[in-house]
Image (spheres, grey):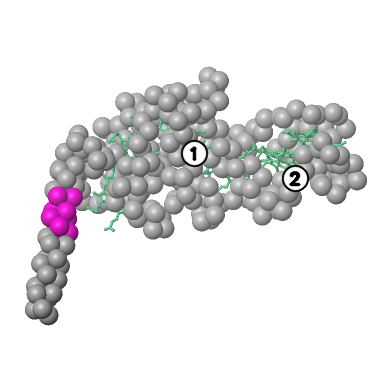
Amino acid sequence: MKSLILVIFLFLAKSVIADDSACLKCHLAHGDQSSETTQHIDTSLINMSVHKKLYCIDCHDIDPAEQHAFRTDVDCGSCHEEVLNIYKESIHGVALANGIKESPGCTDCHGGHNIISHFNPESKVYSTNVPKTCSECHTSERVVGKFGLKADRIATFKESFHGIGNELGEASVANCASCHGVHNIFPQSNPKSLIHNDNIEATCGACHVDLPPDFAHGTIHTSASEETSGGKFFVRKFYYFFISIIIIGFILYRILEYKRRVKRVE
Ligand code: HEC
Ligand code: HEC
Ligand code: HEC
Ligand code: HEC
Ligand code: HEC
Ligand code: HEC
Ligand code: HEC
């Protein structure tokens, strides 16, 4: 009974204060109280987003009657608790909690007012857009250098079979998150990591059935331009050599043929 009264009270309270117009009279460019210093928002982004039914105060804990010049952190976890609990344990979540600002929070990967379903090809986290979203940090010198991360992850992915498929818009091939996890990303040495030695077969096996033994255990991020990549490196070397010989041979052939023709005309 008590909780029913509370729910009714909250509902009434919400319908009194939860009217976006109180915020929009300042935060819309043509709002009657807007000034040059107010940040104007584009409400069409929210209206096209998954959150179109929410009120401003569901995300911004702000009383419109009070001055509030400072940015307030939006607590996405108040509604997405399950995701938050997984994320909190991940390398990104732990790093952010430890004050590492370069580590992604929810909005770095998802956006703010413009969040759309991850099944929508326009989404920052749609399968074929994931590599770009991760690369905002994992190719950035500012982040890679500072944390001693490997800088070649995106380049090597793009060279791979999956990377080429991804670039061609193939949503079924593996993207970064298919192998590393989404909200549960850990370093390979952590037993919870999807690429940990004990888990990698299951990770690849999610898409590749009847794997031959050791299929999953090779290195993934290899580049044909590094000798440590073994076969891939030597095949490429041979290929360059072979193609060069063919091109030189072809040019030589044309020159000789030309000379012969000139001779014949004389
Ligand atoms: C009387 C006008 C006024 C009203 C009403 C108002 N705001 Fe603001 N708001 C401002 C001003 C001025 C600032 C500081 C300048 C700025 O936008 O950075 C601000 C700042 C903000 C910021 C931080 C912007 C930043 O720089 O990160 C957010 C978020 C915000 N308001 C949301 C709201 C919400 C949500 C409501 C309704 C509950 C609301 N405001 C109602 C005038 C107003
Ligand atoms: C789903 C949650 C959500 C809702 C609903 C929402 N906001 Fe925001 N808002 C955010 C987040 C997250 C940011 C910060 C964006 C970022 O860091 O990229 C933000 C940023 C802002 C800013 C700072 C300027 C900017 O564009 O970055 C203002 C002002 C603002 N919101 C006002 C509003 C108003 C007014 C409403 C209601 C019409 C509203 N917001 C509804 C999540 C929300
Ligand atoms: C490192 C990037 C990244 C961060 C940080 C991140 N997400 Fe995600 N999120 C993704 C990707 C990628 C998907 C798409 C998953 C898929 O395709 O199955 C996703 C999917 C989702 C979904 C829909 C699917 C589901 O599992 O319910 C929700 C809701 C979500 N994220 C909320 C959040 C919240 C809340 C936070 C912060 C606590 C957050 N995300 C942080 C990348 C991220
Ligand atoms: C007041 C509750 C609330 C808050 C706060 C909130 N969300 Fe949501 N969010 C929802 C609801 C409800 C849905 C489902 C909408 C639907 O299914 O149509 C949703 C959907 C989503 C989805 C789409 C899931 C999918 O299938 O792809 C993502 C991503 C997401 N939210 C991320 C965030 C992020 C990031 C924040 C913080 C900036 C946030 N949400 C804040 C309630 C909330
Ligand atoms: C906003 C920047 C940012 C984005 C976006 C981002 N990361 Fe990260 N990532 C980091 C930082 C910073 C670290 C290092 C944290 C630490 O060492 O404490 C990290 C660490 C990692 C690690 C562990 C690296 C190691 O050597 O142990 C993996 C794996 C990882 N990220 C994968 C991803 C994937 C996959 C995506 C996209 C879904 C992604 N990240 C998106 C900033 C980012
Ligand atoms: C097919 C699975 C797969 C895909 C797709 C993939 N990775 Fe990896 N990733 C791995 C494996 C396995 C390792 C361990 C080292 C190796 O094999 O090269 C790794 C290592 C890493 C590391 C170092 C982490 C550590 O713990 O040492 C980072 C960072 C990383 N990948 C980021 C990415 C990013 C960003 C993308 C997308 C552009 C991506 N990966 C795509 C499987 C994958
Ligand atoms: C999200 C699903 C998915 C995951 C996870 C995945 N792959 Fe793939 N992979 C594909 C698809 C789809 C193709 C393209 C198959 C085709 O066109 O025949 C492919 C192609 C390949 C190919 C080249 C073609 C072939 O079948 O020989 C190799 C090698 C490969 N994957 C290895 C791996 C390894 C190793 C892992 C785990 C580290 C992995 N994949 C994880 C979906 C995935």
Stretch in magenta: 239-248
State the SS at label 1: helix
The label nearer to you, 1 versus 2, is 1
Asked whether, in this view, residue 136 is left or right of residue 155, the answer is right
Image position, residue 211 (x, y; %): 20, 48
Q: Callout 2: 10 Å neighbours few (<14), some, many (20+)?
A: some
**Toward the viewer: 24 or 63?**
24
The label number, if any, that marks residue 136 in the structure image: 1
Mark 2 C-beta closer than 8 Å to ligand 2: yes
Q: Is the magenta stretch mostly helix, strand or loop?
A: helix
The C terminus is located in which quarter? bottom left
The N terminus is located in which quarter? top right
Q: Give the mark nearest the N terminus, 1 or 2.
A: 2
Q: What residue type is labelled 1?
A: Glu
Would you say the residues marked 1 and 2 are in contact, meaning their CB atoms lie under 8 Å apart?
no
Asked whether, in this view, residue 187 is left or right of residue 265, the answer is right
The residue that appears at 85% across and 28% down in the rendered structure is 67
Image position, residue 140 (x, y; %): 46, 34
Residue of label 2: 41
Residue 14 in view: no
Spatial separation of the CA atoms under disc 1 and disc 2:
24 Å
